[in-house]
Amino acid sequence: MRSMLMCLALLVLNCCRVAAADPTQLPVWQDRVVEGWTLHISQRLLDEDAEATTRAVELLTL
């Protein structure tokens, strides 16, 4: 359940950033498998907020 909530939180945060982005730029994703789930993590999140993104992915493994 906690994993699903964290995925939802990452999705919402990422959608806000994409909505504010330049529409001519295509998003770049990095795929990771955590606990059998495939995560599509925005490269922008990894570049601009690496610490929080890494922590969010770590929390999904608890």
Image (tube, rainbow, N blue to C red):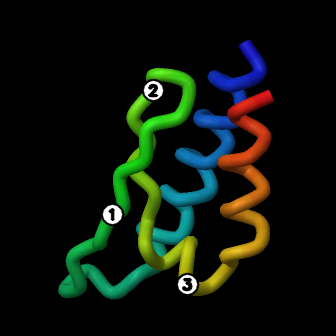
Please give left or right for residue 45 compared with residue 33 in the image: right
Q: How far is the residue under mark 2 from the one under mark 1? A: 15 Å
Q: Which residue is mark 1?
A: 29
Q: How far is the residue under mark 3 from the one under mark 2? A: 22 Å
**Residue shown at the point (62%, 56%) measured from the top left:** 13
Residue 16 versus residue 35 in the image, above or below: below
Q: Amino acid at mark 3?
A: Asp
Please give left or right for residue 3 compared with residue 16 in the image: right
Which image quadrant for residue 47?
bottom right
Q: Which residue is mark 2?
A: 37
Lower sequence index among marks 2 and 1: 1
Residue 58 versus residue 41 in the image, above or below: above
**Residue shown at the point (61%, 48%) measured from the top left:** 10
**Residue shown at the point (19%, 86%) measured from the top left:** 24
Q: Which residue is mark 3?
A: 47
Q: Position of residue 5 (x, y in %)?
A: 70, 27
